[in-house]
Image: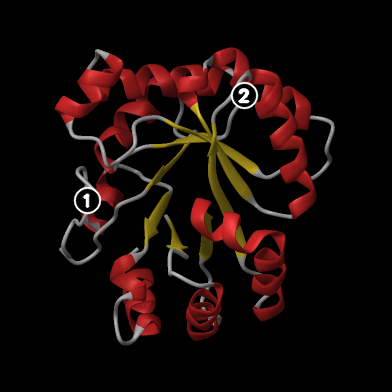
C-alpha cells in the first residue's frame, strides 16, 4: 500500500509549503481539479523542483465523449505525471479509446477509472445510477479491466470485491481515508488504514488529516509506519 497526499490547499504557495515539509518522504502527490485549473503545468514543474522523485497523480476525472477523452489523455502524456484518472461512467468504449490512444507512448502513466465517488451516500447513488454502489462499482471495474486500465478509484469497502472479480494486480485507489478516525467532512464512505489494508487497497489518499495538522510531516510518517 502506498500513500498519496492530496494537495487541496487554497493556494499554490500553501501547497508548495506543504510539499517542502514532507519532501523527505516516499509518497505520491495528488493534484486535483482546483489546483490544476488554478496553477496548471507550472505547478507540476514546481513540485518536481522540490523533489524530482515525487510521483504525481493528476486527479481530473476525465468524462466526455470518447474522442475528446482520448485527446485529453494524449495531452496528459506531455505533462510527465505518473497516474491520471477518467470516469468509468463514460463507458467501456471511451475507456478503451483512451488506452488505445496512449498505447503508442513508451512511458505511460497508470490510468484508473472512477467508479462511485466516495461523497455519494447509498441513496444518492441510487438516484443517479438506479443501482446500489457495490454492484455498480463491480460492473464499472470489470469494464475498466476489460478496457485495459490499470485499476479503479473506489472506496475501501469495494476494493476486495473488485479484486475478486478482476485480478489481485488490478489496482484500487481509495480517497477519503481518515487514518486515525478523524472527522469525515463531506465524505460518506470513509475508512481507516486498518480497513484499507484488510481490503487490499493499493493506494490511500489522505488530505485534510495531513494538511490541517500543525505537523504534517509527523502525520505522514505515522501513516507510513502504519502501512
The spot of residue 192 in percent (x, y) is 22, 56
The spot of residue 75 in percent (x, y) is 76, 41
> Would you name the residue on which mark 1 appears?
191
Q: Which mark is residue 87?
A: none
Name the residue: 52% across, 23% down: 144
Whether residue 53 sits left or right of residue 152 in the image: it is right
> Which quadrant of the rendered structure holds the N terminus?
bottom left
Name the residue: 38% across, 20% down: 165
Q: Residue 226 falls in which quadrant of the image?
A: bottom left
> Which quadrant of the rendered structure holds the C terminus?
bottom left
Q: Helix, strand or loop at disc 2? A: loop
The spot of residue 97 in percent (x, y) is 69, 20
Q: Helix, strand or loop at disc 1? A: loop
Q: Can the viewer see residue 226 in this picture? A: no
Judge whether 168 appears above or below 1 on screen: above
Whether residue 188 sits left or right of residue 32 in the image: it is left
**Measured Cα–Cα span from mark 1 to mark 2:** 28 Å
Which residue is nearer to you in this view: 53 or 41? 41
> Would you name the residue on which mark 2 appears?
148
Q: How many marks?
A: 2
Name the residue: 15% across, 26% down: 123
Name the residue: 59% across, 44% down: 84
Q: Can the viewer see residue 184 in this picture? A: yes
Which residue is nearer to you in this view: 94 or 110? 94
In the picture as drawn, the residue positioned furthest to the front comes out as 38
Amino acid at each position: 500500500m502506498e500513500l498519496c497526499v492530496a494537495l487541496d490547499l487554497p493556494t499554490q504557495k500553501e501547497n508548495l509549503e506543504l510539499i517542502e515539509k514532507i519532501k523527505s518522504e516516499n509518497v505520491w502527490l495528488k493534484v486535483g481539479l482546483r489546483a490544476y485549473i488554478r496553477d496548471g503545468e507550472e505547478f507540476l514543474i514546481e513540485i518536481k523542483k522540490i523533489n524530482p522523485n515525487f510521483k504525481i497523480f493528476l486527479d481530473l476525472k476525465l468524462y466526455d465523449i470518447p474522442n475528446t477523452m482520448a485527446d485529453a489523455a494524449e495531452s496528459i502524456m506531455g505533462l510527465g505525471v505518473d497516474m491520471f484518472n477518467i470516469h468509468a461512467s463514460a463507458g467501456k468504449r471511451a475507456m478503451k479509446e483512451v488506452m488505445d490512444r496512449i498505447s503508442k507512448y513508451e512511458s505511460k502513466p497508470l490510468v484508473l477509472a472512477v467508479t462511485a465517488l466516495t461523497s455519494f451516500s447509498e441513496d444518492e447513488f441510487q438516484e443517479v445510477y438506479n443501482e446500489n454502489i457495490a454492484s455498480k462499482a463491480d460492473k464499472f471495474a470489470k469494464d475498466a479491466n476489460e478496457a485495459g486500465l490499470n485499476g479503479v478509484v473506489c472506496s475501501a469497502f469495494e476494493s476486495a470485491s473488485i479484486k475478486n472479480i478482476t485480478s489481485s494486480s488490478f489496482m484500487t485507489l481509495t480517497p477519503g481515508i481518515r487514518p486515525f478516525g478523524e472527522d469525515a467532512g463531506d465524505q460518506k464512505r470513509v475508512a481507516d488504514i486498518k480497513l484499507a489494508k484488510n481490503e487490499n487497497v493499493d493506494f490511500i489518499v489522505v488530505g485534510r488529516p495531513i494538511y490541517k495538522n500543525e505537523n504534517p510531516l509527523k502525520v505522514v510518517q505515522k501513516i507510513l509506519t502504519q502501512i
